[in-house]
Image (cartoon, rainbow, N blue to C red):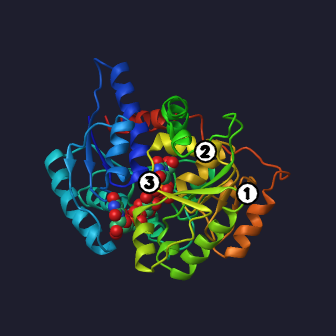
């Protein structure tokens, strides 16, 4: 059976790596019976070496069968170019299923191109909602879920969210809580990160006795609502610099943020913040694991903070990963500088934290098993 996988942005490479591995494992187990042929389509949404190829090399993802070279552009332009080029691939390859991940423009384009050709869409990370429709990601998630036949949910909350919109398991839709494929990846790669990554040494983050670490904060920032709003961006950078007086803030800079900092002529006082290029996945996992706390507006990083047991402060007003907040691991601190600094200073050591069910680290295998059951 033939599956087309559509990826394009950094977090999708990490998610697709887990599922590709599950496909290979399936083929090994069912050598003589069903064989899955995965065709990997890269839209080209992310293209810098550190946003793209480094993940293919490190995660041993297969080389894309098609690279669509779409690159950056306005939402409409980028999505339209992807749509057109993905359609051409799908018409040629005629897969039984198209797998899309998350909530980027590459996700929506893959889903729409497939649905229009009556090819079933499998959405990995279905059912997430921030209930903020000014976020481009929320539009992408909503539309992709409504176009999909297979809705693979990471959490029970995601299944509930879909149900509220009338998307339920039944004759026309397969809605399944499989767990989080990013958890599969964290479990698989964190040991490797421990062995291979030298990022702590490279950044001089080891204490004289090499332990305990946690003498730095880790931050990531790329959400359009933060980077494209000078007031918000300035306020966040100021807060990070303030926090950095206590312990250095490591900030691997997303290219969008770098670009907008140039546009607004923001050069943060770098005393408290160490600006670095985006890091590879293994380096990121290591940086996360030993951070005193994480400040982020990323979706994936919020959960990784939870998996490593590191307190997280989310630089947004709402999150689609609401269970991380309910459980006490994550605080929504918004973008007001004073509030961010005050919340981080509290570093809620005493708060009770409950466990979250993100599955058993085998979400990818369940996804493949389900697709094969219905499509072969
Ligand atoms: C995209 C996703 C977002 C996801 C993020 C993961 C959409 C609408 N947004 O946001 O949901 O969380 O990826 O990182 O799909 N750029 C480069 N080099 C690159 C890629 C981007 O310089 O390799 C710059 C370009 O100036 C570009 C800007 O970053 O215009 C934004 O890139 P884009 O892919 O449109 O959105 P992201 O902010 O990366
Ligand atoms: N990540 C990485 N290097 C970085 C920043 C993030 O490898 O410099 C990883 C991070 O560990 C997580 C994923 O990228 O697995 C999250 O992607 P991003 O924050 O770009 O997107 P989002 O999850 O918000 O869609």
Going 39% across and 25% down the picture, which residue do you hit? 25
Quadrant location of the N terminus in the rendered image: top left
Residue behind mark 3: 278
Residue behind mark 1: 326
Marker disc for residue 205? 2
**Residue closer to the observer: 343 or 144:** 343
Residue 363 in the image, given as x and y percentages of width and height: 51, 37
10 Å neighbourhood of mark 3: few (<14), some, or many (≥20)? some
Q: Earlier in the sequence, mark 1 or mark 2?
A: 2
Can residue 170 be seen by looking at this rendering?
Answer: no
**Residue closer to the observer: 240 or 296:** 240
Quadrant position of residue 140:
bottom left
Task: Name, please, the residue furthest toward the right.
Answer: 350
Quadrant location of the C terminus in the rendered image: top left
Is residue 198 shown left or right of residue 207?
left
Q: Earlier in the sequence, mark 2 or mark 3?
A: 2
- Disc 1 C-beta below 8 A from ligand 2: no
Question: Closer to us: mark 2 or mark 3?
Answer: 2
Q: Earlier in the sequence, mark 1 or mark 3?
A: 3
Going 53% across and 52% down the picture, which residue do you hit? 300
Residue 202 in the image, given as x and y percentages of width and height: 51, 42
Residue 342, above or below 94: below
Marker disc for residue 350? none
Is residue 320 shown left or right of residue 311?
left
Disc 3 secondary structure class: loop
Residue 87 in the image, given as x and y percentages of width and height: 20, 58
Q: CA distance from mark 1 to mark 2?
A: 32 Å
Disc 2 secondary structure class: loop
Question: Closer to us: mark 1 or mark 3?
Answer: 3
């Amino acid at each position: 059976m033939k599956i087309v996988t559509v990826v394009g942005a950094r977090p999708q490479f990490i998610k697709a790596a887990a599922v590709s591995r599950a496909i290979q494992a399936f083929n090994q187990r069912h050598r003589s019976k069903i064989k899955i042929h995965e065709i990997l389509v890269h839209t080209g949404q992310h293209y810098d070496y550190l946003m793209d190829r480094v993940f293919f090399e490190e995660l041993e993802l297969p080389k894309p069968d098609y690279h669509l070279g779409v690159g950056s552009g306005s939402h409409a332009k980028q999505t339209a170019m992807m749509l057109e080029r993905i359609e051409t691939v799908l018409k040629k390859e005629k897969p039984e299923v198209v797998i899309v991940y998350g909530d980027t423009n590459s996700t929506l384009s893959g889903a729409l191109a497939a649905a229009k050709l009556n090819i079933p869409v499998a959405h990995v990370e279905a059912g997430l909602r921030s209930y903020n429709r000014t976020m481009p990601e929320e539009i992408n998630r909503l539309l992709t879920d409504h176009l999909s036949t297979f809705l693979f949910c990471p959490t029970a909350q995601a299944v509930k969210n879909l149900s509220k919109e009338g998307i339920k398991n039944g004759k026309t839709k397969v809605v399944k809580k499989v767990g989080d494929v990013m958890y599969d990846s964290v479990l698989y790669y964190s040991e490797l990160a421990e062995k291979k990554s030298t990022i702590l040494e490279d950044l001089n983050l080891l204490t004289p006795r090499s332990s305990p670490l946690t003498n730095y904060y880790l931050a990531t920032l790329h959400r359009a609502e933060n980077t494209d709003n000078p007031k918000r961006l300035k306020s966040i950078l100021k807060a990070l610099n303030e926090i950095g007086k206590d312990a250095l803030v490591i900030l691997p800079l997303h290219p969008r943020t770098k670009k907008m900092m140039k546009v607004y002529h923001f050069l943060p006082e770098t005393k408290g913040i160490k600006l670095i290029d985006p890091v590879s996945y293994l380096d990121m996992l290591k940086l996360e694991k030993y951070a005193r706390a994480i400040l982020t507006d990323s979706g994936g990083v919020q959960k990784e903070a939870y998996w490593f047991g590191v307190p997280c402060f989310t630089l947004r007003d709402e999150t689609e990963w609401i269970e991380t907040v309910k459980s006490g691991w994550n605080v929504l601190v918004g973008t007001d500088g004073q509030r961010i600094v005050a919340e981080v200073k509290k570093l809620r050591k005493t708060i009770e934290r409950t466990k979250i069910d993100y599955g058993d680290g085998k979400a990818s295998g369940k996804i493949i098993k389900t697709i094969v059951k219905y499509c072969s």
